[in-house]
Image: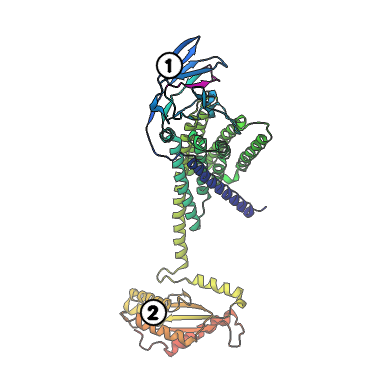
Amino acid sequence: MDYRKKKNLIWKGESFLFVVVLLVFGAIFAAIHTGGLIQNQDSVQLLNKGWYYIKDGKKQEITLPAEIPAKTGEKLILYNESLGAESRGMTVVSTGAQYDLVIRLNGKILYEYKEAMFSKNVQMRSKVQCIAALGNDTEGKVLTFSYSAPQRGKYVIEPVCIGTGSAIAWYQIRKAAIPLGAATIMIVLSMIALCICIYMRIRQMPDRRFRDVALFLMMCSIWLVTDSSLAQSYSRCPEVLCLISFYMFMLLAVPMLRFLQNIGNMKKYRLLDLGIFTFYLNAVLQGVLVILGAFEFKDMLFVTHILLFVWVLISAVLLIREYRKHKQREIHLLLIAYIIVGASGIIALILYWLFEISYYGSIFELGNLVFLVLVIADAVMMMADNVRYRLESQAYERLSREDGMTGLETRANFEKKLESISADMGRYRDILLMYIDIDQLRVINEEYGRAAGDEMVVISARCVENVFQEKGTCYRIGGDEFAVLVYDPEVPDEFWSERLKEELRNIGRGCRHRFSLSLGCSHLRNKDGSLKSMGEWKYEADRKLYENKKKGDLKNGVY
């Protein structure tokens, strides 16, 4: 497979992945919306008092939050008898899924944590919000929270909230402000990056780094939303959201490794291709093992964590190596970004595996945001440099192509065009070549000065351009000489003489000095349709120019 085909294949693959990510994000939003999250806001009360449990036959009163020591396998039941008529139709919510929480009202089960298709570990379960609707008959009844799987020799009981369904929903939104806020910022940044990518492509200055950044941001936002307890609590298919969350996390590094490949000379490191392949292979193998029933996703999560740590470290090492060689600003900035995201990832892993802390994700999200700000800043600075370089190149190209005084194309371009015509003369039906000369320009320069002569040149150029620009291409081929190529002329040569005469009268009325033009023309084909040689074609136009110059043609009424 050649480089161009490989490049197109990569572009199509990443574009497909980007479309899939967008569709997934839309599906997530629809799932949350249909789950009843968007409702009217109301107030939420804390139900932290009136709780007690029985130990050794004695009633132990507690106020939430609380930590209660427990042996392995020892169950805990919390009772609350403070519900009254005002609790009718209310909803209670708390954490506790990691302890297999069951919520009852007078013995009737209102909520029981169960895992269906997707098995979660302790850290994931600790973020689950356990929600139970109390119904309309609450007065004088006993509310119980039953826990059966203590962790690290204790139960850590979080506060219990009570309120209407809409109030509980808004309460959870406020609690999820950090991940939702980060996801919102990432979505906005991804749209900005995508717009920049499209703009650069339209300007024919494609920069794939913006597409990679946009894809990474969208995948991060999907991971944050699907991993949040808010989305899983109000979705009708939380198992699917967990699955999406795992796959977004497993593939998170792919667009960033692609991004890294487009920095400086980093594409030469084939090791980055191996990294991309490794993350794809990891996602496929984990899916196959889960389908075969060999493992659960939660059991293989450490593999993804190790891969992320290893490839962030490898990326940082490659960046250090490249920076030592070239000392480029963009590599230095990216090196800082990778160090930050690597440090945040290590801290998050320590919190996750050693302390089983549920807010490990916030540390990693913060590191990702700092990382993304630096990456986008680098990409924007590079875009600005590319735009400036492109504009300067276009200006230099235009200056090299155009005559500085008249703005017409130069003799070099005229000769280049004649070479192109000579290489394939047979494909042209006919081309009219005209040489135009300013009469007595040397006399004007000597008698009235160079400024007057320059004025004649500019006026003559405007005259030639106005007459021929819609039908042909105009060139300045000498100090007082112009050339015009008219493709497939449809009018006789005299038409151009008269047009030139008329234009010269109109444009020369405001001129301070009397002057005139002479022209000579020649057709690429003879009257019988046969082709002239390039030398014959040019010689005939030149000969006719000097014949007309001797006759004084075009001098009548030209001022």
Does residue 100 sit above or below 392 in this rendering? above
Q: Position of residue 181 (x, y in %)?
A: 43, 38
Residue span colored magenta? 140-154
**Among the two numbered marks 2 and 1 on one chain, the one whose residue lies closer to the N terminus:** 1
Viewer-closest of 544 and 427:
427
Asked which secondary structure carries label 2, the reply is helix
Q: Are there few (<14), some (14-19), or many (20+) residues within 10 Å of tag 2?
A: some
Q: Quadrant of the C terminus?
A: bottom left
Does residue 348 sit above or below 422 in this rendering? above
According to the image, label 1 marks what residue?
62
C-alpha separation, residue under disc 2 versus residue under disc 1: 109 Å
Judge depth for marks 2 and 1 and give the one in front. Answer: 1
Q: Position of residue 255 (x, y in %)?
A: 55, 44
Q: As shown in the figure, which amino acid type bears the numbered disc 1?
A: Ile
Residue found at the very far bottom of the displayed protein: 551
According to the image, label 2 marks what residue?
442
Q: As shown in the figure, which amino acid type bears the numbered disc 2?
A: Arg
Q: Position of residue 222 (x, y in %)?
A: 51, 41
Q: Are there few (<14), some (14-19), or many (20+) residues within 10 Å of tag 1?
A: some
Does residue 21 sit above or below 351 in this rendering? below
Is residue 317 visible in the rendered image? The answer is no
Q: Residue at x 48, y 44 (%)?
A: 330
Magenta segment, principal secondary structure?
loop
Q: Residue at x 51, y 17 (%)?
A: 76
Q: Is residue 142 magenta?
A: yes
